[in-house]
Image: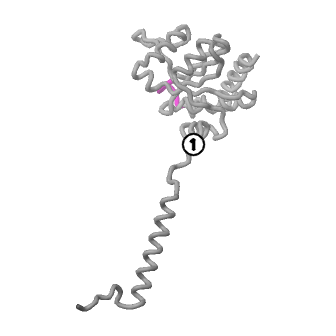
Amino acid sequence: MKKTKLFKNKLQMIIYITTFIICVILFIIIGQTDFHKEELNDNQKISSLYNMVPSDNLYVFSNASDVLNIINGNSSGIILMGFPQNEWTNYYANILNKAAMELKVDKIYYYDFYKDRDESNGTYEMIVNKLKVYVQVDDEGTKDIHAPTVLMVKNGEVIAYFDDTSTMKGEVKPEDYYNEYQTTLTYEMFKTAINEYMK
């Protein structure tokens, strides 16, 4: 019986063996590579949601329970309530961050309440009830938080509640509203409240 050669010639043998070795090396390299994207921290996530806010901001993500905990006096905090779909929040987030950084605040809680409000989340409803003297009432008599809102609470006492631009939809665009004068006015408003909060 005639033996069949595995390789026709030495060149073919070298090519096959080299190809096999390269495949093994690539397999090892790919197996050791971590393809997971680097996780963004809260500051970077906020900056990606709100392009006016720098990546070295003070924001930490919070949920309805965190906010309710602060309102109930279990801790104190400055809270920005808004959501990326609301372009006014971008301006509020940026101005508040600048004022807080100047006054050496350690962090600002960020609560995106869009889904909680939409689904009438129980904890969200408790927040609204706790803030009933501050929240706006619509034409149908429904009380809700509107974006953007800044809340400052110290030991269960509401120091400040700002939602002055939350009902300006359609009246004026935020880029027109926030001229140099209005930006400075809002900045000073936040600084005054933060100073009161930090006493």
The residue shown at (64%, 40%) is: 54
Q: Position of residue 95 (x, y in %)?
A: 65, 30
Tag 1: amino acid: Leu
The mark total stands at: 1
- Left or right: 192 with respect to 140? right
The residue shown at (59%, 25%) is: 80
Residue interval drawn in magenta: 168-173
Secondary structure category for the residue under label 1: loop
Q: Position of residue 127 (x, y in %)?
A: 52, 14
Q: Is residue 64 above or below residue 138?
A: below
- Please tell me how crowded label 1 is: few (under 14), some (14-19), or many (20+) other residues with Cα within 10 Å: few
Residue at the farthest front position: 1
Task: Indicate yes or no whether the magenta region holds residue 133.
Answer: no
The residue shown at (51%, 50%) is: 36
- Left or right: 127 with respect to 93? left
The residue shown at (75%, 29%) is: 104
| Residue occupied by mark 1 | 40
Work out whether residue 22 or residue 48 is closer to the camera in this orientation and state it.
Answer: 22
Work out whether residue 145 or residue 16 is closer to the camera in this orientation and state it.
Answer: 16
Residue at the farthest left position: 1
Q: Position of residue 22 (x, y in %)?
A: 47, 73
Residue 83 can be seen, yes or no = yes
Q: Position of residue 30 (x, y in %)?
A: 48, 61
Work out whether residue 56 or residue 138 is closer to the camera in this orientation and state it.
Answer: 56
- Magenta residues, dominant SS class: loop
Residue 167 can be seen, yes or no = no
- Left or right: 192 with respect to 21? right
The coloring applied to the image is one colour
